[in-house]
Image: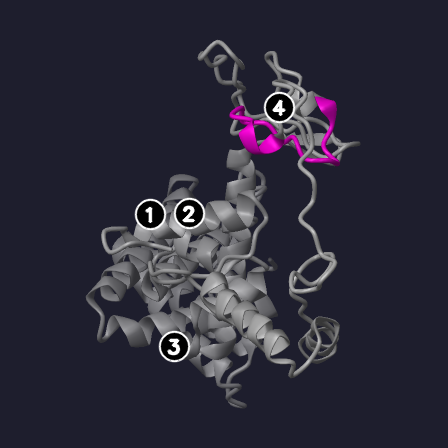
Amino acid sequence: MPSLLTGESTARRAEVFASDVLGKQVVRARDRAGFIVNALLVPYMLAAVRMAESGAASAEDIDRGMILGCAHRLARSRSPISSDWKPPTPSRCRCTRSSVSRCTRRHRCWPGWSTRACSGGNRAAAGPIGRKPVRRYGKMERRGTGRRAPPHPIAPIQNGSSNVTMAERTLETRERTLTSACEVIAEMGFEKIRMRMVAEHAGVSTALLHYHFETREKLFAEAMKHSFAQTGTELERDADSVPASVILARIVHSMLPTDPELRQDWKLWQELWVRALRDESAHHLAVDLYEQLHTWVAEALRRGISSGEFSRCDIDATSTLVLALCDGFGIRLMLDDPRVTLDTAQAAIWQAVAGTLGTPSAFPEV
């Protein structure tokens, strides 16, 4: 329930804490009397009381009708308007020997809670009987002294046989969210997606998604970077033991839609091209990613030239030619053009640069 002075980032952090840390479902309401639940519940209960008083129906029939018709009753045990209903007798607080209503300590003294809750001393607040005491936000209170014990570090979350820290869990959630964003954007297109779609696909709350990515534009930019970072991660696994021509051929192969994952990456690139024509931030992102691709190809050419496998050439011009040819043939492959196949595309790209590099014109085995 944000006030008029509450910032949006503060409200989102509160939602993330309530949903992901406390495990609650979050609803938003304006800062007004009664908020949502009480604003609806109190008039409903008063109407039930007036109905019983007027003789329109008995308290039991009102309860039974609301349970059967709306799956809602007026109280947990009995209807508060029943003639034999009485409030529960307050239990005795074990720390002050007074009734619960007069106990000023921050303990849970109601029946069903263990004696550890009100026994005093430097102990954590207790939960229901049979559960371990719950540490409140990493610190415990010293009852009766007015001091606090030094904060304890948050224990790592147990995940099977290994310990997963909060930072690792946050990183894993972010990676899963970006992977889901890539899939949804590739399938639906950027203009049709909503943050809710990505959150549902990733299995996270919308509040958590907004916590990591404030807008669709920022989510799209991070998804593009994530997709780009995953491309070619395995290409240079044995770069020291294979010829430079094989490395360059692998780069060409990975920049064409040769499998379902690369076809998904190509759909993201096509979305980026369209957005870059109208959006300045997308334009800068596209130019930056192309610069990284240019460097990637250029490094492979320099490696081949330094090893003597490639002839000396204009590295920048050759890198630009490779990228341009991959873009052109990639579009035709994405359109399933019957005149262009993967083999013919790879062969045409390689023949275009083989003479400059002084290598055989046949595309190497990758």
State the CA–CA distance, disc 2 to disc 1.
Answer: 6 Å
Query: Label 2: which residue?
Result: 14
Query: Label 4: which residue?
Result: 98
Q: Are marks 2 and 1 in contact (CB under 8 Å)?
A: yes
Q: Nearer the viewer, mark 2 or mark 3?
A: 2
Whether 228 is drawn above or below 256: the answer is above
Please identify the dominant SS of the magenta region: loop
* Amino acid of disc 2: Ala
* Amino acid of disc 1: Thr
Q: Nearer the viewer, mark 4 or mark 3?
A: 4
**In what quadrant of the picture does the C terminus appear?**
bottom right
In the rendered structure, which segment of residues is drawn in magenta?
Answer: 100-115
* Amino acid of disc 3: Gly
State the CA–CA distance, disc 4 to disc 1.
Answer: 40 Å
Query: Label 3: which residue?
Result: 328
Q: Secondary structure at mark 4?
A: loop
Residue 109: image location, x then y, percent: 65, 30
